[in-house]
Image: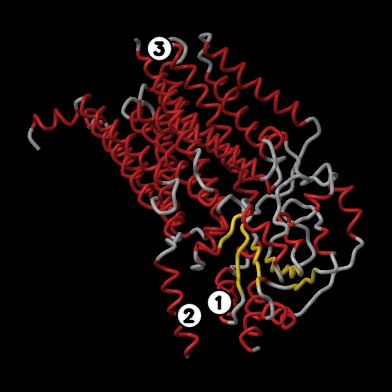
Amino acid sequence: MNDLVIDIAVLVLAGFVGYTVISKVPNTLHTPLMSGTNAIHGIVVLGGLILMSQSSGFLEKVILVVAVAFGTINVIGGFLVTDRMLGMFKSKDKPPAQDASSEDSGNVA
Amino acid sequence: MSLSATVFLQSTNFIDAAYIVAFGLMIYGMTGLTGPRTAVRGNKIAAVGMAIAVVATLLRQHEFSGSGTVWLILLGLVIGTAIGVPAALRVKMTAMPQMVAIFNGVGGGAVALIAWVEFRHGFGGGYPLRIEIFELFGAIVGSVSFWGSNIAFGKLQEILPGRPIKLPGQSLLNFGFLTIAVASAVILCAGSHSQALFILGILVAAAVLGNMVVLPIGGADMPVVISLLNACTGLSAAATGLALGNPVMIVAGMIVGASGTILTNKMAKAMNRTVPAIIAGGFGGAVAAPVGGGTEGGTVRSTSAQDVAIQLSYARLVVIAPGYGMAVAQAQHAVRELERALEAKGVEVKYAIHPVAGRMPGHMNVLLAEADVPYDLLKEMDDINPEFSRTDVTLVIGANDVTNPAANTDPGSPIYGMPILEVDKSSAVVVLKRSMASGFAGIDNPLFYEPKTSLLFGDAKTSVTEITAEVQAL
């Protein structure tokens, strides 16, 4: 098999993985998921890194620095924002218990 | 580091192995993102995978050190970090949809810029056709995604009007620009190396297309559009990966492309819209007139915080239906206080969460989670709808379109068929509203004119705080 065939095989398989992973996501997590996958396509930053060494001339270097900066914003911003969002989801067990106790003490007072 | 170790780290085998570990972690992390308990860890695992991919690529770059490349790469990384980190840390939870839009946009922009450099390198002779095709695909889709996301950002940030902006013959024009882009791509693949053609035919035509496709789309449909553009950026990243022969880019890009497409469909379904209908544009614009006429003449009943407090305190079951208006007023903490005050009086309180409450599916859950509302009080639409018939009072806070009964009853309504929270089935409805302005979709809501509905005008946070104080005083 030549490289192109292998690459396209990888592409198709990855497509199925993406499909399978997402098919059982609850509505609740759609926003974090969108934001998380958004961060993952920041992988394009690699393209900027790879091409940087082959670039020649001022214009190309400027374009690539901007591309790397864009990609970095995409990756770092995406993961951080997703982390912040997900950090707010409390598991059912712990925080409500704390809430209940603080509510009780409030009532007593 | 000894020389042999350096050689090993820079060997293709090592880097390829690191790539495989990297995309393995990203896939594993994404599986975690599908459950609330594993999501935080999943996101971190995916981030580690990304970090490994970047480091592995930089190792490979090491052989080129000396030409200032390292410094340029560092410059790009530093600029990106300096912009991305503060933006991500400072953004308010309510502004999350537009933040995702802009992060998505810069990703698409990066793809288009990379394609531009690739074009300058080897098009018209140097490169095999496969590279040219994938790069051109990436350039077009990336550019559309960049500009489309910027418009989406502008609309959600309310820099641009949320209402559809439409030109006559819009679809035809869009089709024309798409044709220009594709035709230019074909000419370039056929061997031309005209830089003007690349810039004008590909980048500019795609940019105009991106603007024109998103501008006519109403604000209410924007989440679906962002999700779609997210998928597009993923696909364009995968195309760049194919052109560069980089496995981790192919896998990561394609996973986003596939999952983004599914997610887009799911969201559209939750709003009872189809993706083609959304892209064709014009929510509300064409149909607003016939809808407005019937109900606008009705009278509304306004009420006071004290009355609402009494109504709520003597209810058995109160359902709170929060909307984006609650989030804008930053009222989620006040709402949580009200819920506690009512629970202290023995009133059962539940939250009714429409799938697209807020501005994105799940957005409202994030906002209420921020205010420490326990998970199990949040009821999804299908679970809460049967309960409205035994609900004494439904408190609608800054929600509009998702409670509009016209979606069930009026075939002429632009949102007819959209699944809604059936708040009109409860015994009484109290609507907290800033003014009589219509919702994000620009559609009048007959719910407000029903005899059992009373409206409390004012800022949601102030109103809720007042109600809470009255409830506690009772």
Q: Residue under circle 3?
A: B126
The residues bearing labels 2 and 3 have C-alpha atoms spaced at a distance of: 72 Å
Residue B370 in the figure: left or right of residue A4: right
Residue B143 in the figure: left or right of residue B56: right
Quadrant of residue B338 within the rendered picture: bottom right
Residue B232 in the figure: left or right of residue A44: right
Q: Secondary structure at mark 3?
A: loop
Q: Secondary structure at mark 1?
A: helix
| Tag 2: amino acid | Glu
**Percent x, y of residue A66:** 43, 38
Residue ID at (35%, 14%) = A3
Q: Nearer the viewer, mark 2 or mark 3?
A: 2
Q: Pointer 1 indicates a residue of which chain?
A: B
**Cβ–Cβ below 8 Å for labels 1 and 2?**
yes
Q: Residue under circle 2?
A: A103
Are the residues under marks 2 and 3 on the same chain? no
Q: Pointer 2 indicates a residue of which chain?
A: A
**Percent x, y of residue B279:** 68, 35
Residue ID at (36%, 28%) = A51
Report the front residue among B429 and B71. Answer: B429
Compare marks 3 and 1 and give the one earlier in the sequence.
Answer: 3
Up the image or down, B187 lies above or below A79; here it is: above
Up the image or down, B157 lies above or below B112; here it is: below
